[in-house]
Image (tube, rainbow, N blue to C red):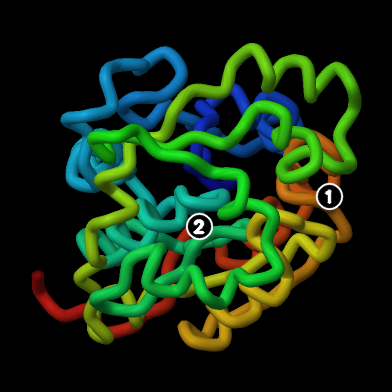
Amino acid sequence: MSSILLIHGSWHGAWCWHKVMPRLVAMGHDVLAPDLPGHGRALSAPGGITLQSYIDALAPILAAAREPLTVVAHSRGGLVLSALAELMPEKIASAIYLAAVLLRDGETVFDIAHHADDSLLLPNMFAAEDRSWDMLREDAFDEVLYADCSAEDRALCHLLLTPEPLAPSLSPLSLSAARFGATYKVYIELTEDRAVTPKWQRYMHQAVPCDEVHAIAASHSAYFSKPDEVAHLIAAIARSRGGARDTHEVAPH
């Protein structure tokens, strides 16, 4: 079976995969879900955390893998996945974007924010005066992120969400056609998403064409509301890719 790396999104930590992980493990996969710096058990002051901090935390996991990994990113975690695909494309069998940010070379999240004019996310976000972090208003958590989630899952998130380091979102991605472009990319739309809305998702995966596009009828936090569907789709993609990337020519870094 495949080895799978799960990358969480804004304000969350590895804990958000707590339903998906055991399902994938039960199917025979090896699963890793690390906390990005400044999140979960790696919580620290957000001011010094950059996109490079995220890359430095995850690159050793890819480097140590004996076979290419299936890497899944949710929401703003897509920034990290794209950066890793540029750095180590030979280590990624499939890059799966689960309602995740998918940018072109030189872009930041905020460069394409105008395509999110139907999103409830941006109107409910606020940032620190020193621009070291951003956060979602707590009274908007449920409507924006957890519209179809249980009361128990919502309660967990109200206890655990933390401010998001802002520097990674302000850093333009440096991506090449020879490396990032050669990585096998899959986009999973969440069709009821009120944060990264279907309109925004489709803009991104049309601007950066993906090898596969799938859809799950769920809101932004499908790993809570539809864990079976999320796990089975990830497993099916991993299985179809055979745990190895295509024999694309990858330019030396």
Which residue lies at the image location 49% right of the left edge and 62% below the top edge? 101
* Quarter occupied by residue 198: bottom right
Image-based side of 141 in relation to 56, left or right: right
Picture layout, residue 244 above or below residue 212: above
Residue 72 in view = no
Which residue lies at the image location 80% right of the left edge and 23% below the top edge? 153
* Quarter occupied by residue 42: top left
Picture layout, residue 157 above or below residue 23: above
Q: Residues within 10 Å of mark 2 (few under 14, many from 20)?
A: many
Q: Nearer the viewer, mark 1 or mark 2?
A: 1
Q: Position of residue 222 (x, y in %)?
A: 77, 45
Image-based side of 6 in relation to 52, left or right: right
Q: Position of residue 29 (x, y in %)?
A: 61, 38
CA gap between label 1 and label 2 equals 20 Å
Front one among 95 and 30: 95
Tell me whether the residue at label 1 lies in contact with that at label 2, contact meaning CB atoms closer than 8 angstroms: no
Front one among 8 and 232: 8
Image-based side of 230 in relation to 55, left or right: right
Q: Residues within 10 Å of mark 1 (few under 14, many from 20)?
A: some
| Amino acid type, residue under disc 2 in the picture | Gly
| Comes first in the chain, label 1 or label 2 | 1
Picture layout, residue 110 above or below residue 106: above
Q: Position of residue 30 (x, y in %)?
A: 54, 34
Q: Which residue is mark 2?
A: 243
| Amino acid type, residue under disc 1 in the picture | Glu
Q: Which residue is mark 1?
A: 229
Q: Secondary structure at mark 2?
A: loop
Q: Secondary structure at mark 1?
A: helix
